[in-house]
Amino acid sequence: MNKKDLFDALDDFSQSLLLTLAEVEAIKKNLQAVVEENTSLRLENDKLRQHLGEVEHTMPTRTSQGRDNLEKIYLDGFHVCTDFYGQRRDNDEEECAFCNELLFRE
């Protein structure tokens, strides 16, 4: 390999390194922006969790009156699920899984 070819190869390698360095710097800037946004979102999330905890402690406990009313309607022979709401259940019909899920979920 002559000197000119060696110099050209070294120059190409140098240019490639400069391009790679520019790409690394761009990635570094993007990463820094993502880390800053992540930190900001974590702080906001912590504040929202704290506020939610305060709100939950001040809210009155829910009564199960609505659930009791739905159960009475269901026992009277009507569907309370969203799929068949208000339709009469036949006397020999087995229990509706959708209604039971609605009535007995936590």
Image (tube, rainbow, N blue to C red):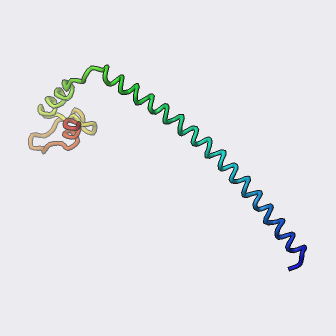
Q: Residue at x 53, y 39 (%)?
A: 38
**Nearer the observer, 73 or 103:** 103
* Residue 13 position within the rendered picture, expressed as x and y whole percent measured from the top left: 78, 66
Judged from this view, the residue extending furthest toward the left is: 92
* Residue 90 position within the rendered picture, expressed as x and y whole percent measured from the top left: 13, 40
* Residue 102 position within the rendered picture, expressed as x and y whole percent measured from the top left: 23, 37
Judged from this view, the residue extending furthest toward the front is: 3
Looking at the figure, which quarter contains the N terminus?
Answer: bottom right
**Nearer the observer, 5 or 58:** 5
**Nearer the observer, 100 or 1:** 1
Q: Residue at x 82, y 68 (%)?
A: 10
Q: Residue at x 31, y 23 (%)?
A: 57
* Residue 94 position within the rendered picture, expressed as x and y whole percent measured from the top left: 13, 45
Tally the numbered discs: 0
Q: Residue at x 35, y 22 (%)?
A: 55
Q: Quadrant of residue 40?
A: top right
Looking at the figure, which quarter contains the C terminus?
Answer: top left
